[in-house]
Amino acid sequence: MNGQFVISLDFELLWGVRDHAVRNTYGKNVLGARDAVPRMLELFAQNEIRATWATVGFLFCEGKEELLASFPSELPAYSNPRLSNFSYIDEIGKDERSDPYYFAPSLISAIHQTPGQEVGTHTLSHYYCLEDGQNTSAFEADIVAAKKLAAARGIDLRSIVFPRNQFAAEHLNICAKHGITHYRGNPTPWAYQAAKGAEQTSMRRALRLLDAYSGALGSQTFEANAGQPKDVPASRFLRPCAGRLAPLHPVHIATIKRGMTAAARDGKGYHLWWHPHNFGQNPEANLDGLGQVISHFATLRDRYDMKSLTMGEF
């Protein structure tokens, strides 16, 4: 069997970080993401790279009026109210032009029109499946509303990335019920297991950081499974080239390349993921890192006939 290279992006803008960030603290990253998305699409198109863009449903909306009309039949009732993006509706602007932090229909259209790109879901409201207070009926209402918004644009959502990688078996059953066929699962080591925010200890974070730059927990390649929906587990998060760890970015890219090579050689899958807003600061260095990954894939495609696939094609 040929190796498979899968890319997924968590496309969320400010919706994905609003519980701990605002325009003043993270706005540059969000606006930088808007500039980076077209450049990523161009890079993908030039190199025949297929990717899944797991998109927060609210980003589809043309404006606040449509956003309000898209609300699900049941809202999440997190014990921590800061987690609910419905808490921040009053601060949202009129439309994409006046509020580029919360709306992105033009970018979604560009993604949808670029060959080889799949628009998936990151839930309607960036829903946290494992946080205290949430329940499965609210999650189901969120998924139904997300699919409805996308369907109005002629997009059938078939792949899901769970916000903050939180999910359990009951959430997968709901996804299958509503026609979602693929999801991004987590790598097998303990540090990557699905957990609510309070359980993301410093030990887990330290192990993930160590692994990102060394591959100490393994190459994280995977094989296809027969579940429904089908698990396309993450292999590696493409970390941004930023801050104190920026000098180590070449080491991180080398770790990714080693995992890709192992997958190509052994006929397995390798799933790389990131957020567009990770490229919002220092975009040239981050796009250069992505270019190196894509160039390495081209080498593996020539040598091992490795395939580029969306999540929904895996």
Image (tube, rainbow, N blue to C red):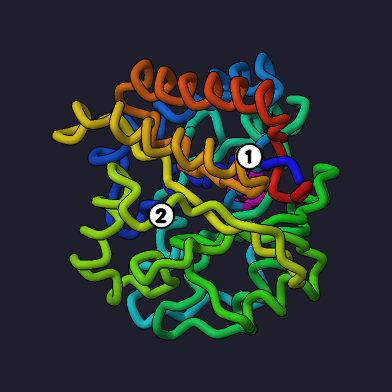
Q: In which quarter of the image is residue 73?
A: bottom right
Q: Which residue is drawn at 43% across and 38% down?
A: 256
Pointer 1 with pointer 2, Cβ within 8 A = no
Badge 2, how many Cα within 10 Å: few under 14, some, many 20+?
some
Residue 112 image offset from top left, x and y in percent = 74, 33
Q: Where is residue 46 in the image (x, y as percent from the top left)?
A: 67, 14
List the residue tagged with mark 1. 5
**Where residue 3 sits: x, y (%)?**
67, 41
Which quarter of the figure has residue 61?
A: top right
Q: Who's the residue at 78% across and 58% down the image?
A: 148
Q: How crowded is mark 1: few (under 14 residues within 10 Å), some or many (20 or more)?
A: many
Point out which mark residue 103 bears.
Answer: none
Residue 58: give x, y in percent of width and height.
59, 51
Amino acid type assigned to the residue bearing label 1 in the image = Phe
- What is the secondary structure assignment of the residue under circle 2? loop
Whether residue 233 is in magenta: the answer is no
- Depth order, front residue of 6/129: 6
Q: Which of marks 1 and 2 is in front?
A: 2
* Residue position for label 2: 218
Q: In front here: 103 or 258?
A: 258
Cα gap from disc 1 to disc 2, whole angstroms: 17 Å
Q: Residue at x 62, y 30 (%)?
A: 107
- Magenta segment boundaries in residue numbering: 57-67
Residue 58 among magenta residues: yes
Of residue 2 and residue 284, the one placed in the foreground of this image is: 2
- As helix, strand or loop, the secondary structure at mark 1 comes to strand
Vertical side of 24 occupied by 186: above or below: below
Residue sitting at x 55%, y 62%: 162
Depth check: give the residue in front, 294 or 96: 294
Residue 198 located left or right of residue 193 = left
In the rendered view, would you say 81 is above or below 39?
A: below
Task: Say which amino acid is labelled 2.
Answer: Gly
